[in-house]
Image (cartoon, rainbow, N blue to C red):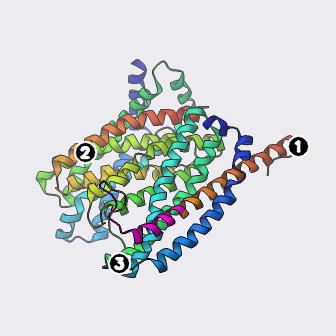
Amino acid sequence: MNAIIATFRRDAALLWAGGGGALAPLGYFIGAVVLAPLAMGPDRTLLTAAGPPLAWVAAALAVLASLEKLFQADLEDGSLEQMLLSEAPLEALVFAKGAAFWLVVGVPLALAAGPAAITLQAPLERIPVIVASLLLGLAAFIGAGLVGAAVAAGVKRGGVLIALLVLPFFAPPVIFGASVASGQDVGPALALLGGCALFGCVIGPFAAAAALRLQAE
Amino acid sequence: MINFLANPARFMGATAWMAPVFGALALVLFFIGVRLGLFASPAEQYQGETVRIMYVHVPAAWWSLGIYTFMAGASFVSLVWRHAMADLAARAAAPIGATFAAICLITGSIWGAPTWGTWWEWDGRLTSMLILFLTYLGYLALISAVDDEEKASRLAAILCLVGFVNIPIVHFSVEWWSTLHQPASVLRPGGSSIDPSMRTPLFVMAGAYFSLFAALLIAHMRASVHRRRVEAARLRAGGAAP
């Protein structure tokens, strides 16, 4: 248990401090949100209809862009070997890494999606569910992202490769998330998002740990 | 069976005849299927002659799903038993499946233009076929990005198995987000609703696609075994690999 908490704290600290910290994905997210009205034009009715789901797309892109740093450094500096030697199961350590990523990258993104959705003309009363849906959806994204980042960890400059590997798994959460953001079937869509998140939390660490064992061979 | 085929020498012995036989079978079935589909089968009441695109489109859709399922099975065998030939099978099947998925998407788009009045519609089946195609591309990209061939196969096998959750989504997407695409009409509970005059050419074409897949798969796997033997012989002879 100690090893799991230590991994969580170490990863959270590293993500918070290193490489732009939590600000880098956040800035990326805001930039992507700004591009949407610039591309579509500032027309209010168009933005009201199409804008809020774009906050979801931007959040997905921000996660994709930051997945590369999940395992790359661990593989290079030998931390991965230490994790394999640890008494704690690798799956649990990977889960801790994912949880740290969710806390440092995911939660700020979900919170920032509130104001972002307002600028995209989402009605105010819908903002809390959009934030809640992103908290769940980002967990699903990160679960899938663990797998992509783990199988491509040994590849130099694998960022685009990881994005390609992970994108197909982003489809279900994005579908249900966009449904929440545009105010259709909010309850069932949130439930399905919760399902996606649980699925990602279970499958992600197991598949990623299997891949990391191969990487360390 | 799995154990028997794990030995490349036995695999080569057992499959020597397969690629040409399946290749010839594919040719014959394509000849019959195209004749039946393009000339001998009736035009459809509402769609007219464009219904003939179905004989190219639907088997490609079936087998692009079937091949992914095959790859998932091979990946499972490869991960559990460290089975070298299963590795090769999954790797060899991927480009064929990706091509079938591309054929399905392209012919579907061509078919959609006259019948639905649009080249593309974001409904369940189209979207999930596109996502299956992306999954294939990701698999192929990962295989080519990792230098160590064996490690690449194992990592791709993990990715393939996780991606396998997409297959049920593809299959049930019609019920999930059904919009424009007609519901399944050939394989469904309660029997097939398609007329035999159209079913026969469809199944012949499906057989042709399968034979083509089998021929290409076996030829690709055998070529990989030969390539490894050549590399091994080069190393034994003391020369560096090119």
Q: Estimate the spatial distance between the alpha carbons at disc 3 and disc 2, rounded to whole Å.
A: 40 Å
| Mark 3, secondary structure of its residue | loop
- The question of residue A91 being in magenta is answered with no
In this rendering, the label closer to the viewer, 1 or 3: 3
Main SS class of the magenta portion in the image: helix
Amino acid carrying label 2: it is Leu
Q: Assess whether residue B192 is covered by the magenta stretch.
A: yes
Q: Which residue is mark 1?
A: B237
The residue drawn where x is 23% and y is 70% is A42
Q: Is residue A73 left or right of residue A140?
A: right
Q: Position of residue B56 (x, y in %)?
A: 48, 70
Q: Residue furthest front?
A: B196
Q: Chain of mark 3?
A: B
Amino acid type at mark 3: Glu
N-terminal-most mark, 1 or 3? 3
Mark 3 or mark 2: which is in front? 3
Regarding mark 1 in the picture, which secondary structure is present there?
loop
- Residue at 27% across, 42% down: A136
Please tell me how crowded label 1 is: few (under 14), some (14-19), or many (20+) other residues with Cα within 10 Å: few
Q: Which mark is residue B44?
A: 3
Q: Which region of the structure is painted magenta?
A: B189-207
Q: Residue A68 at what x, y percent from top left?
A: 48, 45
Specify whether B9 is left or right of A144. Answer: right
